[in-house]
Image (cartoon, coloured by chain):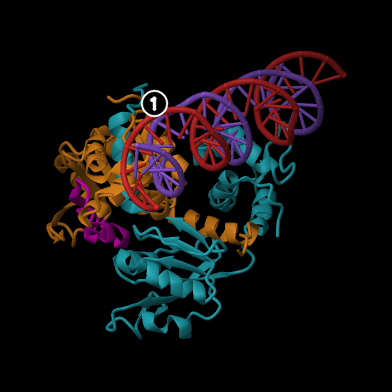
Chain colours: A cyan, B orange, C purple, D red
Amino acid sequence: MDQNKIPQATAKRLPLYYRFLNNLNQQGKRRVSSKELSEAVKVDSATIRRDFSYFGALGKKGYGYNVEYLLGFFRSTLDQHEVTEVALIGAGNLGTAFLKYSFLKNNNIRITKAFDADASKVGKDIDGVPIYHVDDIEKELDNIRVVILTVPASEAEEIAERLVKEGVNGILNFTPARITVPSHVRVHHIDLAVELQSLVYFLKHYPLEVE
Amino acid sequence: MDQNKIPQATAKRLPLYYRFLNNLNQQGKRRVSSKELSEAVKVDSATIRRDFSYFGALGKKGYGYNVEYLLGFFRSTLDQHEVTEVALIGAGNLGTAFLKYSFLKNNNIRITKAFDADASKVGKDIDGVPIYHVDDIEKELDNIRVVILTVPASEAEEIAERLVKEGVNGILNFTPARITVPSHVRVHHIDLAVELQSLVYFLKHYPLEVE
DNA sequence: AAAAAGTCGTGATATTTTTCACAAATTAAT
DNA sequence: ATTAATTTGTGAAAAATATCACGACTTTTT
C-alpha cells in the first residue's frame, strides 16, 4: 500500500478536494490557488497546502496549481480509475435515499446490490439496484468488501457479524448502534441524531461572534 | 451561556453518552464504570473520564458513576428539558427518511415543519409533519433557528441565505455544497459521498492489523 | 477487621492537527 | 528590465486531542 505518512485528517479531506477540482475542470478552469480552493471548500489555505505537500510538490510558486494535473493526481491517489462496488444493507427510507442519490458523479463508487428483510421488496429493484433478502447475504454478497448499513439499530450487531464473516472490511454505519467488529474491519459511524443534537448543543453553549 | 472550557471534541461526544445512559437507565442499571461505557460507545475509558471531568467530579472512586445521577446531569447539560424545534428543507428521499426517522426517542428535538419545492407535496404531511412550499419559508418558518438542509446542491446556497435572513443560526447541511454564511451561523456538513469515499480510501491505504 | 480488587480524577506526556510566517520562486505590471 | 504582486512549500510554533499511569478513595471479599 501507500506511505502511511498521510495524516488521517488529510485523508478525510481528499475526496472533498477531488470533487471540487472536478467542478473546476468542468468549468474549464486551468489554474487554481490554495486561496481560491480555501474559499470554496472552507478549509484554511495553509491546511490545504500542507495537505497537498504530503504528496510532494504539486504546485508552482507564484502560480498555484494546474487543475488538470492536480485532478489527475488525485484521481489515481483516490483510485478512481477502478470501480469500487458497495452493497447497501437495509432499503428503508434512508437506504432508498442512498440508492437514488447519484454518487455516480465524479466518483467511481457504485452500489450494486441491496438487501432488505421485507419480502415484498425482494426481487424488485430501486434505480436499477436489485434487492435481495437479508437471509441471502451469504449467497449474494460475492466479493463486496464495503457496505452501507442502514438497518434498524436492533439488527446492526448481528448483521455486522455476518458481513464480517463474508469478508467485509469496511462498514459505513448509519445506525445508532456502536457495533463491535474485529480490528481488521473499519467502521465509520454517521449518527444523525448525534449530529443534530451536537449542533444544537454548540449553538446554545458556544455563541459565535456576530461580525 | 456555559463555560467555554468544554473542548469541541468532548461536546461532540456528549449526545452519544447521553443516549447510552438512557439505555442503561431503561434497563434498570444503577451504576456504570468508565470501562463499561468505553466498550459500549467505543471511546477510550480515559477519554471518557476526562470528558466527564470537565463538568466536575461526577463519579465516585472505586464505584463508578451513578446512572440516574449522570443521566440527569447530562439531561440538563444538553438542555433536554426544553424542546428544540427544527425545520427540514427539502422533503426528497433523504429528507423523508429524516421525517420518518424517530428522533423522538431519548431526545427532545422535533422536526415540526418541512418545506419542499414540489407543489404536489405541499399541504400534505409526512408522519405528521406539515409540508410547506419553499417559497413560503419567510412566511412559515416562525422562530425556528435550526434547520436540516436536504435540498439539491444547486439550491443550497440561495436557500441558506434566505434561512439566515430569517434568523436561522444552525444548519445541518447534507448537500455537497459548501455554503457561505455569516460568522454567527454554524454549519455542520455531512457529506455522504465524501464519507463513503474516504472510507474506501482508508481501506486501501491504511491496512488494519489482523489480530 | 484487614486485605484485595476496582475505579475515579488528573498531572504529565504523547500524538495529532492546525496555523503562522517567510524565503524562494514565478508571474504580471510598469 | 525592473519592480511589484502572487503564491507555494515548509520550519517552527501553537492548539487541540488522546493516552498513560498512579495516588486516593470505595467497595468487595476473606
Q: Residue at x 27, y 83 (%)?
A: A120
Q: Which residues are magenta?
A: B91-118
* Percent x, y of residue B187: 37, 39
- Quarter of the C terminus of chain A within the rendering: top left
Q: Is residue B132 visible?
A: yes
Q: Is residue B159 visible?
A: no
Q: Quadrant of residue A54 in the image?
A: top right
- When the figure is inspected, residue A131 is found, relative to residue B158, above or below; the finding is below
* Percent x, y of residue B90: 28, 54
Q: Nearer the viewer, residue A50 or A21?
A: A50
Q: Residue at x 53, y 58 (%)?
A: B199
**Which residue is denoted by mark 1 in the rendering?**
B5
Q: Nearer the viewer, residue A85 or A174?
A: A174
Q: Residue at x 19, y 53 (%)?
A: B104
- Letter of the chain that mark 1 sits on in the rendering: B
Instruction: Tell me if C3 is positioned left or right of A82 in this view.
Output: left
Q: Classify mark 1: helix, strand or loop.
A: loop
